[in-house]
Amino acid sequence: MTKTRTLPFQRPVMLTALLLIAALLLSACVERRADRIAFDDEFFRATSKKLDKDRINFEVTVRPVSASLEGARDAGRQEATRYCVGNFGSSDIEWIEGPDAEDGRLRVSRDTLRLVGRCNAR
């Protein structure tokens, strides 16, 4: 049997290369704070998802509402706009449970605001 020999410098170079690749992959997944948008001087986690097959009806959740209700409303409105523009090319939204409802009529549970809307696809 022939035994393959590695040169003494190959192992550290390979390890360094693997670590650099791993660092680049991880940095691509992490959202930089500088790229985030603050609403009412606070940062919110806003997510959107479709409610049916055709993606026209959607739900947006925003948290933490306790940081600022007004900021959470604006973050939800922005996320809904991003969702509709990304899926239909239009920012026209018909709200079912929208951010402009009176404070007592907004659906807030466990520090999370829930908004429901429909994209007006043209």
Image: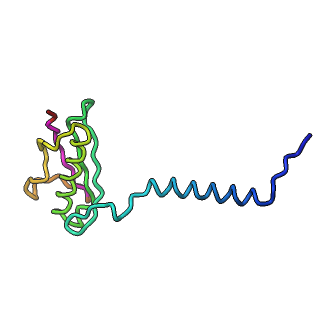
Q: Which quadrant would the N terminus be assigned to in this image?
A: top right
* Colouring mode (rainbow / by chain / secondary structure / one colour): rainbow
Q: Residue furthest top?
A: 53
Magenta stretch in the rendered image: 112-120
Main secondary structure found in the magenta portion = strand
Out of 115 and 118, give the one closest to the viewer: 118
Answer left or right for 61 relative to 91: right
Magenta region includes residue 119? yes
Residue 42, given in percent of the width and then of the height, sits at 25, 67
Q: For residue 63, which quarter of the picture? A: bottom left
Residue 85, given in percent of the width and then of the height, sits at 22, 42
Q: Identify the residue at image location x=20%, y=55%.
A: 108
Q: Residue furthest bottom?
A: 41
Q: For residue 53, which quarter of the picture? A: top left
**Would you place residue 79 above or below residue 43 in this image?**
above
Q: Which quadrant would the C terminus be assigned to in this image?
A: top left
Out of 4 and 53, give the one closest to the viewer: 4
Q: Identify the residue at image location x=33%, y=61%.
A: 35
Residue 76, given in percent of the width and then of the height, sits at 21, 53
